[in-house]
Image (spheres, helix red, strand yellow):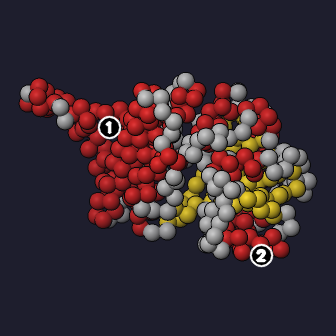
Amino acid sequence: MKLSVVIPCRNEVDYIEECIDAIYLNIVPNDVALSVFVIDGMSDDGTRIKLDDLKIKYLSLHIIDNIKQQTPFAFNLGVKADREAYFIQIVGVRQILAENYLAKAMETFASNKEIYCVGGKVNNVYLNNKGRIIAKAMSTSFGMGLGNFRTLDSSGYVDTVGTPMYKKEVFDKVGFFDESLIRNQDDDFNYRVSKAGGKIYYDSNISLKYYVRGTFSGLWMQFFQYGYWKVYVNKKHTTITTYRQLVPPAFVAYLILLLLTPIFGAKFVLISGIPLLFYKVLLFIFSAKSAKNFLDFFQLLITYPILHISYGLGYLRGMIDFILLRKKPSENQKRLSR
């Protein structure tokens, strides 16, 4: 049996060695042949030099050029690299697998034939204090919504996972990653997996370490793009893929309409402001609960609205571009924020 690990990569000289070492430190059954494919987007920061050294250390390590330099192309190049693979594991360079990740994920497939995809728990490591704050916000149901795999403590079925292993046969059933999606290509793919009758399983007993990058400007752009591209995915499938995605755009639309309420009188202003007051109460509660000190509390008060408002604005922009104006995706939104 063959297992292929696919690593999309571009300019990750500081993390590529730890990522690959962790994969080869995984304890897999003797009858499993492991191959690793780094799909490199023409790195120019020294990553390729490190990869050449690692190829000497690990004979089953392969490097494939991704001249398009975009994530869905990297996914597809990696998936297609080994036609004999039975399992495909996708790993980001800053995702450091625990030594039991691969074996336990394969065991999970054996427990239920309806499982098409398995992913594990993310343990965040922070590159700076803002990254720590952002990770705290993204690990709460208030920050990310109910049912998001980042907020779960126990194993169960979900709509998507962050570091997925798939059976290779899944790609024969549902096709490959949509290369027109610069963002949300994994959401789109996993939605197709679910539509085909497959289940996606989050296993809290397997884990990985993830190096969180943290700037508020990068977070704003990242979640704006998530919202924007989510509409494109919805239009493609002519449906709402997850209902929690509607909360941020509804909240932003409410804030915009709230600006018009003074023309209806003071009483209407007071009544219409109740949802905003409720949001502020939740904001203070969740910020206080996660904060270690006053500075944490202040930064969380900023982080949660960034998550919600940026996603909501991106979603509304996507509705205008894709639904109302029937435009193609903006070139500006094809540039990744990380």
Q: Is residue 195 left or right of residue 260?
A: right
Q: Is residue 8 visible?
A: no
Q: Is residue 274 left or right of residue 13?
A: left
Query: Which label was assigned to residue 252?
Result: 1
Q: Nearer the viewer, residue 7 or 291?
A: 7
Question: Cβ–Cβ below 8 Å for labels 2 and 1?
Answer: no
Q: Is residue 88 above or below residue 133?
A: above
- Mark 2 → mark 1, Cα distance in angstroms: 50 Å
Mark 1 Cα shell of 10 Å, populated few (<14), some (14-19), many (≥20): some
Query: Which label was assigned to residue 53?
Result: 2
Q: Amino acid at mark 2?
A: Asp
Residue 237 percent coordinates (x, y): 58, 27
Q: Residue at x 29, y 40 (%)?
A: 279
Splitting the image into 4 quarters, where does residue 54 fall?
bottom right
Q: Is residue 29 above or below residue 260?
A: below
Q: Nearer the viewer, residue 200 or 309?
A: 309
